[in-house]
């Protein structure tokens, strides 16, 4: 059977992708950030996951304001790297895992979560930056990826409570797939940041640190946080953190924290990262 072996939380700041693509990772500004991912890349090399179920958000790239699904699962054979205005990032295209993706779609929809099935979708920095942080700059990504896009761009957004419950449904789906696969689930985006308006530049380190601590030991506290609190405490884009709750919901109640890292700032954002192993 397929099994979820671990969960990863990781931010997706586009400037991180730019720093990697232009060889700036060892500059004084960027080195402390990238140092925090050295463990993670070595760990991934040893773990050799078959599939990443990658929870991320599209930033009006594949979906415009014309059309935004709350939860969308990528069922295609592959996904091209999006052009977000400066040409596509020089990273490999993403190979999908259609059999497992369709199985998850069927199972999760029968568990009463309405997913949108996506058969063609370009993936933006929300997905490619976490891939680069965890896998470096390979010629091909070392595993297949199921992109799972969550709307955190246009209100109303899903609650943390619903995201956490969805994670549990995704776990049941993955564990009922009849193929021996090592699957990781990633929750991406965050931590605190606001890119717009009078509060642009907002970062809330104590709030982030409490989130990083409790994602491991008290996810139910986090699942009860309403969207308004994310906006007030973590900035308008801090709401991206609800995606970490999908990841956390898919793991055991008890997890082992293998690694964590927090760095302020990267561009306008507090970068957070955690690796949770099933205990
Ligand atoms: C930044 C952060 C994001 O999450 C994003 O999607 C775009 C920009 C930033 O910090 O610049
Ligand atoms: Fe973002």
Image (cartoon, helix red, strand yellow):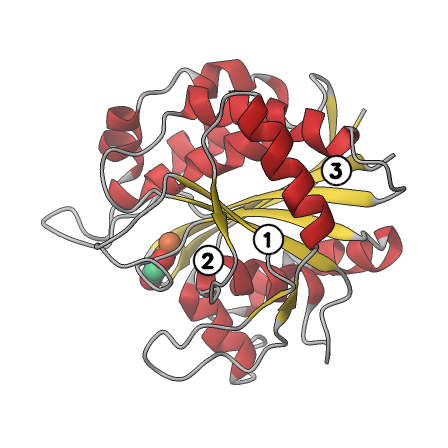
Quadrant assignment, res 14: bottom left
Q: Which of 121 and 85 is in front in this view?
A: 121
User: Which residue lies under the disc numbered 1?
Assistant: 75
Q: Where is residue 273 in the image (x, y as percent from the top left)?
A: 58, 46
Q: Can residue 190 be seen in this view?
A: yes
Q: Which of 65 and 204 is in front in this view?
A: 65
- The response on whether ligand 2 sits within 8 Å of label 2 is yes
Q: Which of marks 2 and 1 is nearer the N terminus?
A: 1
Q: In which quarter of the image is ligand 1?
A: bottom left
**Where is 227 relative to 220, above or below?**
below
* Mark 1 crowdedness (10 Å alpha carbons): few <14, some 14-19, many ≥20: many
Q: Are marks 3 and 2 in contact (CB under 8 Å)?
A: no
Q: What element carries label 3?
A: strand
Estimate the spatial distance between the alpha carbons at disc 3 and disc 2, rounded to whole Å.
20 Å
Q: Which of marks 3 and 1 is nearer the N terminus?
A: 3
**Where is 144 relative to 247, above or below?**
below
Image quadrant containing the N terminus = top right
User: Which residue lies under the disc numbered 3?
Assistant: 6
Image quadrant containing the C terminus = top right
Question: On residue 126, which mark appears?
Answer: 2
């Amino acid at each position: 059977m397929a099994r979820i072996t671990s969960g990863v939380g990781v931010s997706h700041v586009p400037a991180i992708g730019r720093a990697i693509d232009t060889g700036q990772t060892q500059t004084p500004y960027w080195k402390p950030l990238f140092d925090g991912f050295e463990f993670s890349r070595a760990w991934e090399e040893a773990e050799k996951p078959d599939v990443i179920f990658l929870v991320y958000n599209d930033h009006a790239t594949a979906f415009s304001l014309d059309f935004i699904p709350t939860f969308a699962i990528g069922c295609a054979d592959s996904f091209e790297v999006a052009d977000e205005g400066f040409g596509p990032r020089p990273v490999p295209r993403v190979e999908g895992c259609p059999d497992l993706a369709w199985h998850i779609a069927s199972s999760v929809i029968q568990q009463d979560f309405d997913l949108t099935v996506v058969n063609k979708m370009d993936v933006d920095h929300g997905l490619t930056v976490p891939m680069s942080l965890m896998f470096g700059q390979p010629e091909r990504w070392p595993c297949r990826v199921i992109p799972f896009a969550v709307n955190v761009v246009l209100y109303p957004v899903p609650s943390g409570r619903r995201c956490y419950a969805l994670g549990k449904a995704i776990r049941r789906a993955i564990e009922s797939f009849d193929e021996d696969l090592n699957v990781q689930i990633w929750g991406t985006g965050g931590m605190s940041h606001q890119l717009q308006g009078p509060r642009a530049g907002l970062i809330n380190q104590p709030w982030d640190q409490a989130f990083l601590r409790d994602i491991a030991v008290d996810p139910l506290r986090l699942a009860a946080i309403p969207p308004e609190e994310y906006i007030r405490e973590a900035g308008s884009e801090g709401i991206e953190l609800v995606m970490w709750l999908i990841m956390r919901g898919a793991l055991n109640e008890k997890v082992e924290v293998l690694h964590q890292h927090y760095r302020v700032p990267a561009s306008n954002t507090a970068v957070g990262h955690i690796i949770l192993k099933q205990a």
